[in-house]
Amino acid sequence: MTRISRNPLGVFLHEMTAAGDEFAALCTRLAGQEAPAATFPINVWQDENAVYLEGDLPDVNRDTLEVTVTGGDKLSIRAERAKSADVEGVTWLRQERPVGKFARVLGLPTLVDTEKVEASYVNGVLKVTLPKVAAVKPRLVPIKTE
């Protein structure tokens, strides 16, 4: 069995962010304001050549999906899931699938080549490859001898 190691600080920060998001949503509801756009789960990783992202957006129409890279170091993803048809005469026990607009804006850890960014959307999974600019890739410097 393969074990995925996780950075304990990253797990802690994720949990703190989730708690902060829940608190902010509660305050928004109590203040009678409109809720902000829903988010969706993502995985982000990098190697020496690129930054990669996978995001789960099931049941989102491709026509509402928008991926934008700004300034070479900021990625924005926006989408919208249509509301399900209203069902008459039922009592909802749980409604966890958000509808409406979704948005994520991420600061990237390095500059990326905006002209070479690629995105695909298959079976509800958005995949984005963001190639790093050549200036930030590691380069082995040859050592000359006389």
Image (spheres, rainbow, N blue to C red):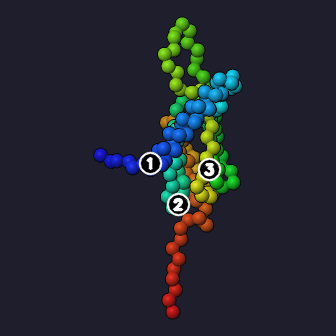
Between circles 3 and 1, the one closer to the viewer is 1
* CA neighbours of label 1 inside 10 A, class few (<14), some (14 to 19), many (20+): few
Q: How far across and how far down the image is residue 133, in percent?
A: 61, 62
Viewer-side residue, 109 vs 18:
18
Which residue is rendered at x = 53% and y = 71% of the image? 139
Which residue is rendered at x = 62% and y = 32% of the image? 24
N-terminal of the two: label 3 or label 1? 1
Whether 14 is drawn above or below 110: the answer is above
Mark 1 residue type: Pro
* Residue under pointer 1: 8
How far apart marks 2 and 3 lie (CA) works out to: 17 Å
Whether 142 is drawn above or below 46: the answer is below
Q: Secondary structure at mark 2?
A: loop
N-terminal of the two: label 2 or label 3? 2
> Disc number at residue 18?
none
Is residue 80 among what the camera can see? no
Viewer-side residue, 120 vs 139:
139
* Residue under pointer 3: 107
Which residue is rendered at x = 52% and y = 44% of the image? 13
* Residue under pointer 2: 49
Between circles 1 and 2, the one closer to the viewer is 1
